[in-house]
Amino acid sequence: MADSDTEVVIVGGGAAGLAAARRLHEAAIRCLVVEARPRLGGRAWTVTDGSGHALDLGCGWLHSADRNPWSAIAQAQRRSIDKTPPPWERPSLAVGFPLAEQLDFLKAQQALDARLDRVTEQSADSAAAAFLDPADRWNELMNAVSTYYSGAELDCVSALDLARYHDSGVNWRVVEGYGATISGYGADFPVVLECPVRRIDHSGRRLKVETAKGVITADQAIVTLPTSVLADDKVQFTPALPEKAEAATGLPLGLADKLFLSLDGADEFERDSRLFGRTDRSKTAAYHLRPFGRPRIETYFGGRLAWELEAEGEQAFFDFAVSELAGLLGSAFARRVKPVQFHRWGADPFSRGSYSYALPGKADCREKLAAPVDNRLFFAGEACSRNNFSTAHGALETGVAAAGQVIAERKRS
Ligand SMILES: Cc1cc2nc3c(=O)[nH]c(=O)nc-3n(C[C@H](O)[C@H](O)[C@H](O)COP(=O)(O)OP(=O)(O)OC[C@H]3O[C@@H](n4cnc5c(N)ncnc54)[C@H](O)[C@@H]3O)c2cc1C
């Protein structure tokens, strides 16, 4: 790409950027998606293993699937939807976690969720950990679960933000991959890959977007960068936008990493079942056994544990998983698993984390991040979603909303 001119430039080709581009394309507005990576999808990324199975290294679950627009898009792309209930809605394997204890844990988790649900707009925006019963024996495990869905422990997370999250409770998967569905949505419009944006100059009559491959001149821009990138000034604005950097700082990306293992003798385990490595500490992984019935284990690491293991390197994740699994299933189990696929989202320069959470007191940063600037710079991405943040459908909705704002503005002017 040499220097070019378009009506709307879209910074970032993830779920939000592609949804925005699709909406503008339908409205016959010329737009260009500029993406730093050599692929579309961002934090949605499907790879294929040696057996031809699709593995989602980023988003995998169609959360709120019955009203999630990606469900219909996947079907329109002729993909198969798997409606098997997720492991967290069924009892885990009893190994190291007898059923009676699981019921006790479930009661504690439901009581915490009920206390968080009672948080209202009038409540102080405190840390979710303030709603734990200090005497509860399951606090460590509830913190571990928080690292899987927020990417952070409960002491870091705003209770008000959690209370605003909407969840229909229906969770499905795309057999051929959620990431493949999202990147496939970007097939029909102009995209430049391997083209990091460095500066967005909004000082003149038209925007100048400086990239690694030249300058793009445009009327408007939709910025869908992850909050980690916005907070660290990796993309500069001229004039500066300190209010955006501040909002992004209030919404850091938590960390969740997935390690896929192959599993010999997988039939011994029920399909789509689950094990926790430990039930007495928050630094533990969750093991999803035989996802889609395949001979695989999908391992989740979150929060402080994931950051620590990333600092040690990729091998540390495998060693940790093997030691927890051997602790539960016997030392011979170590010979039955091998690493298949993995990605360190914290070390990834274009995401530096997995999904956003709001710090205590910062729930309102989502609206601040989403607010347009001068009706020329529009913002989208999962972190801008008030009720569906941290998800791929939340990202899509913010992309469509930002495109709607652009369309309305172009009609006005
Ligand atoms: C391990 C993991 C598991 C997850 N599980 C689920 C799940 O089960 N269900 C669910 O709904 N969600 C899940 N998510 C979250 C979901 O993937 C994200 O919320 C969603 O994909 C974010 O989309 P986005 O468009 O907001 O951001 P992104 O996908 O991050 O898109 C932003 C784009 O901007 C690009 N970019 C960055 N810097 C620059 C630059 N300087 N110039 C140009 N481009 C740049 C990035 O490369 C990226 O493509 C998961 C995420 C991870 C990491």
Image: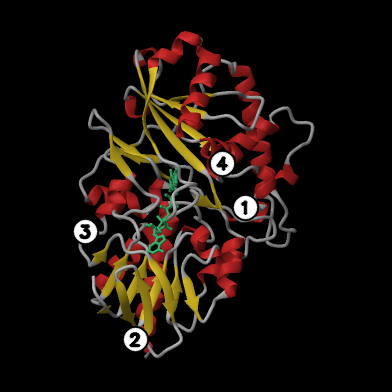
Residue 307: mark: 4
Residue 245: horizontal and vertical position, in percent?
A: 57, 68
- SS at mark 2 in the image: helix
Precedes in sequence: disc 3 or disc 1 = 1
Of 304 and 137, the residue lying toward us: 304
Front position among marks 3 and 4: 4
N-terminal label among 4 and 1: 1
Q: CA distance from mark 4 to mark 1?
A: 26 Å
Name the kind of residue labelled 3 in the image: Ala
- Can residue 89 be seen in the rendering of this structure? no
Task: Check disc 2 and give the amino acid type.
Answer: Lys
Whether the residues at callouts 3 and 2 have beta carbons within 8 Å, the answer is no
Residue 267 pos. (x, y %): 34, 14
**Which amino acid, by three-letter code, is at mark 1?**
Ala
Crowd rating for badge 3 (residues with CA inside 10 Å; few <14, some 14–19, many 20+): few
Sequence order check: which comes first, mark 2 or mark 4?
Answer: 4
Identify the mark at residue 411; answer none if there is no mark.
2
Q: Position of residue 288 (x, y in %)?
A: 44, 28
Identify residue for label 3.
Answer: 187
Find the distance from the CA under tag 3 to the CA under tag 4.
34 Å
For the rendered model, the colour scheme is secondary structure
In the drawing, what numbered circle is on residue 27?
none
Q: Residues within 10 Å of mark 2 (few under 14, many from 20)?
A: few
Which of the two discs, 2 and 4, sits closer to the camera?
4
Residue 180's place in the image compared with 190, above or below, is: above
Quarter containing the C terminus = bottom left
